[in-house]
Amino acid sequence: MIRTGISTIALALMMAGPAAAQTGKQGATPTAAEADAFVARASKEFAEFSVDDARIQWIYATYITPDSAALVAKSGAEGTEMAVRFALEAAKYDKAKGLSPDTKRQLDILRSAITSPAPTRDGAATALAELQTDMQTVYGTGKGTLNGKPISGSDIEAAMGTSRNPAELKEMWTNWHDNVGAPQRQDYQRSVGLLNEGARELGFKDVGAMWRSNYDMPPEEFAKLTDKLWNEVKPLYESLHTYVRWKLNEKYGDAVQSKTGPIRADLLGNMWAQEWGNIYDIVAPEGAGDLGYDIGELLQAKDYDAIKMVKAGEGFYSSLGMAPMPETFWQRSLFTKPADREVQCHASAWNLDNVDDLRIKMCIKVNSDDFVTIHHELGHNYYQRAYNQKPLLYRTGANDGFHEAIGDFVALSITPDYLVSIGLLDESKVPSADKDTGLLLRQAMDKVAFLPFGLLIDKWRWGVFSGGIPAGGYQGAWDALRLQYQGITPPVKRDETKFDPGAKYHIPANVPYTRYFLARLLQFQFYKAACDQAGWTGPLHRCSFYDNKEVGAKLNAMLEMGASKPWPDALEAFTGSREMSGAAMVEYFAPLKAWLDEQNKGKPTGW
Ligand code: X8Z
Ligand code: ZN
């Protein structure tokens, strides 16, 4: 199974079962042929283990009970033990002379692509799996409150997007963080110890260094690359921050949002202040700001339900020439939140048999956020199917940012004209060119706002794993990074009895997050390339490559590669460039940046 919403190779590698160690003769340097045989054996055993493991994980994620939790922890521990054993063995075969590039690459994948390594000593993998499952159960079953009444994770997420009442927002924010985050603090600290011990046994400095070593370059260089990329787009974020803070001050007044300093985290339309598109109404440019439509309202007006939304997403991929999702996708996916049981609502995409048992798991609501997320998840599924002919260890993204970028890249094509072509928007309602600023601002509220958030989650974890952030300073360091990068502040005082990182899914689930930062930039690189291929000459943000089979074929060629080649090769195959870069995103938003800077004249900037 490759459960991409959660992780890619990492989980492929966690799906492991007991295997007899068959290393080369004790002490002797193994031969290239022995290394080939080892890779084949490891792949086969992973593949065999993975199907049952995937089913167990699926059952847990779609029906959280003490029983499914116990089973998922047990299977997870077995998988980790096997993955670690293969990683240690791979290190030995790595020394063989005359290795083929493919064997070398697969050995490297075996060595480093484990997200949750555990030490080999007895009981450690089980202890780690139990801690991680406990945290995920706290997250998956956690509740906040609204007006004193309990409210589920998916409902509170939606309510944070629509409420404009600062007291309600503060209540929801505080209770979610207190109820879901704080109880995980001890378990998280213990899990960090075990993860680091595991990473060190595998020859890495700490888990952070291990995560950073999966990008076809030395881990230190990768950290530098992320900073370089951030610096390319930071001015865009600062312009947006200045403008949005001003608008929030106009709306709520000094007592709620001051004209200077950080923005109050609960006012931005999202529980984590990671995407701000839901408060577009507050920031819309005067006069030209009304786009004349909201995707959520269009869907509701046309009586869309969850299935119809997913069908629309599938329709886009079909228009590129991709085969429809298999019948089993429709039979086995979880599209809506069941009324009678606990499920993990955080969206994910799965391939349970590594071939074509594709599924998504989501608690879909009929709104704009979820329409985009459906395209995101389907992007994972189409990627998974495209590379399913490759050797098992290559059945993942060129890097994890690629996997996260595909569906978002497709969703950038949801332009007004596209909405007309699928019958959601009336032709007479297509916003005229004078609405371009509004369209770009709506997009920037999601795409640009996310950038510092996408970066800081792993800045925090890299610090925790390296020891730079001590266990007694988890909360303080989190707040400091949120302030430094995002320029936001919690609505109530936090202290070290809290654990706000645990209130974000990817912390209890231990899913690396830099992938989403990379994806935010990559999706614009892909989009610009696709629009160039399509011969688009208008403003970039009005381009839709819907129905373009040529773009589809070229995209598929990149997707089919999976991880078989270093990611610059894959990037080059589709875009002609070998560098990840913020330039395409900066170009897309250039007209908005000029407009924002005009609006911001004379206003306080920075925090
Ligand atoms: O976790 C996700 C996807 C599943 S891979 C829904 N995303 C990040 C998040 O929700 O925090 C997509 C955008 C960022
Ligand atoms: Zn994803």
Image (tube, grey):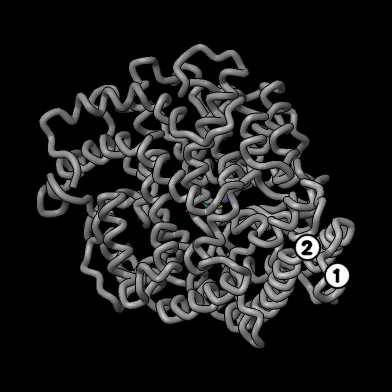
Between 54 and 477, the residue placed more toward the observer is 477
x, y (%) of residue 349?
A: 64, 53
Q: Is residue 110 above or below residue 427?
A: below
| Residue that mark 2 sits on | 93
Give the number of callouts. Answer: 2
* Residue 332 seen anywhere in this rendered image of the structure: yes
Q: In this view, does 432 lie above or below 126?
A: above
Position of 148 with respect to 416 (left or right) is: left
x, y (%) of residue 378?
A: 64, 44
For the N terminus, the quadrant is: bottom right
Q: Is mark 1 on a helix, strand or loop?
A: loop
Mark 2 to mark 1 CA distance (whole Å):
8 Å
Q: Is mark 2 within 8 Å of ligand 2?
A: no
Amino acid type at image mark 2? Tyr
Q: In this view, does 24 lie above or below 578?
A: below
Q: How crowded is mark 2: few (under 14 residues within 10 Å), some or many (20 or more)?
A: many
Position of 290 with respect to 457 (left or right) is: left
Say the numbered circle drawn on residue 553.
none
Q: Residue at x 74, y 28 (%)?
A: 321
Between 501 and 332, the residue placed more toward the observer is 501
Q: Which residue is drawn at 16% across and 50% down?
A: 261
Position of 521 with respect to 578 (left or right) is: left
| Residue that mark 1 sits on | 24
Q: Residue at x 74, y 33 (%)?
A: 322
Q: What element carries label 2?
A: helix
Amino acid type at image mark 1? Gly
x, y (%) of residue 149?
A: 35, 71
Between 357 and 111, the residue placed more toward the observer is 111
* For marks 2 and 1 on the same chain, the one whose residue lies earlier in the sequence: 1
